[in-house]
Amino acid sequence: MDHGMPGPQGPAALARLVAETDWAATPLGPQLHWPLALRLAVDLILASRFPMLVMWGEERAMVYNAGYAAILGARHPAALGRPVDEVWPELRGQLGPLISRTYAGEALWFEDLEMEVARNGHPERAWFTFSYSPLRDALGVVRGLLNTVVETTDRVLAQRALAEREAELERRVQERTAELMRAEQALRHSEKLQAMGQLTGSLAHDFGNVLQVVDSGMHLLSAEGLTPEERQQVTEGVGASLDNARRMIRQLLAFARQQPLEPVAFDLSARIGGMTELLRHSLGRGIRLETALAEGLPAVTLDPAQLETAILNLVMNARDAMPQGGRLRLATGLAGGRPCLTVADDGEGMPPEVMARLFEPFFTTKPAGKGTGLGLAQVHGFVTQSGGDVRVDSAPGQGTSFTLVF
Ligand SMILES: Nc1ncnc2c1ncn2[C@@H]1O[C@H](COP(=O)(O)OP(=O)(O)OP(=O)(O)O)[C@@H](O)[C@H]1O
Ligand SMILES: [Mg+2]
């Protein structure tokens, strides 16, 4: 657009054109007879560099300045003195009501109003920010309007392009994220399969060991000439091996367990108190079990069977961490107002790389036949499913303490 520029479309040229137009042939009539209000308004717009338009009379005939001429495109100069409906027939539906409201005395202002205009011979979408102000005659009657209009098409299009680029970028980010998640899932799936393979292998191996111990035990027991002590030793060996097999089965069942938890409300300390005899038994003589069970704790709502399995898993780990014997502490209390349970040993402790993988199913540092790596996976699964947290504190040589907060 060249509004405000000198030349055939410039302000001076337009002023000249207005002066030379034969207004008698237009609805506005000869310039000499124009009412004062119209003359003042036309003088005002011709002096302005903003695109401006005066509409006057019932016909809504147009007088405009150089800036507005640029908006008119090829419709200028034929539009001078013509009714707006004739100049912009395609905008009649959109502008008609606005013009009527202004003629009724209302001042209007619109920002980035979209219009479809055919100024260059074909329809184009264009945006305008403009105002309509009523023009009154000496008696205060609205006779026309003053329209200041700025085309904002370039800015609107630039903003839209920017918004589109942003949306495109956002979409690409989302696509990448989804892709990564798919890849990660595939990886996890394949890791799981690999782990299942390992598990099957190690289970077969573990049960093979158990069977071998039982088998050779049976042979030994049926042999002649065994002393009662030897007989006792063999029986204990077979018993321990079967215990091991039972432990493996229990953990597999806990891990494979599909049915939802069956929580009931109970007192944590009382439930643990009821387990201590059993625990003392399975710990053996080298390990001292100490309990510090707080009274009057708020009730927990948990699946009791799962809780017992979790405690057994923690206690068995503690036992395994203290092969030379030691001290195992079972304590209940409050952590941040929530009931909690701590299982602490003074065993070998853990290095950070073990701490990092502790809860992974099938992660174990124990030799084949000793651990399936499912104990802490069960503890973690159960506690988090019950809305609690597991906290671990450990260092090599410093012992380990697990706290379950419910
Ligand atoms: N109290 C502890 N002290 C030292 N290390 C521990 C302790 N508890 C767990 N760990 C380490 O964490 C690993 C994972 O424990 P988790 O109970 O999940 O499996 P596991 O004991 O090896 O096998 P499972 O319990 O299935 O027989 C153990 O192999 C061990 O290295
Ligand atoms: Mg374990």
Image: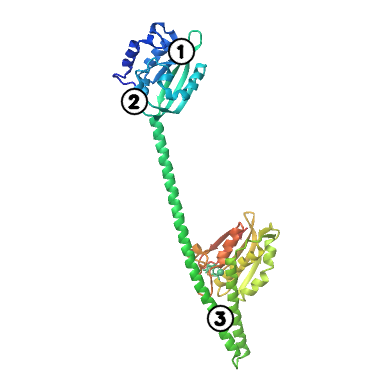
Q: Determine crowd level at label 2: few under 14, some 14-19, many 20+ residues with C-alpha closer than 10 A.
A: few
Q: Residue at x 35, y 10 (%)?
A: 22
Toward the viewer: 64 or 166? 64
Q: Earlier in the sequence, mark 3 or mark 2?
A: 2
Ligand 2 quadrant in view: bottom right
Callout 1 amino acid: Gly
Q: In whole angstroms, how far apart are the C-alphas of marks 3 and 2? A: 95 Å
Q: Residue at x 57, y 72 (%)?
A: 248
Residue where numbered disc 3 is placed:
211
* Rendering coords of residue 314 (x, y %): 59, 67
Q: In whole angstroms, how far apart are the C-alphas of marks 1 and 2? A: 29 Å
Q: Earlier in the sequence, mark 3 or mark 1?
A: 1
- Residue at the far left in the pictured view: 7
Foreground: disc 1 or disc 2: 1
Q: Residue at x 60, y 60 (%)?
A: 383
Toward the viewer: 405 or 52? 52
Marking on residue 57:
1
Q: Determine crowd level at label 3: few under 14, some 14-19, many 20+ residues with C-alpha closer than 10 A.
A: some
Marking on residue 1:
2
SS at mark 2 in the image: loop
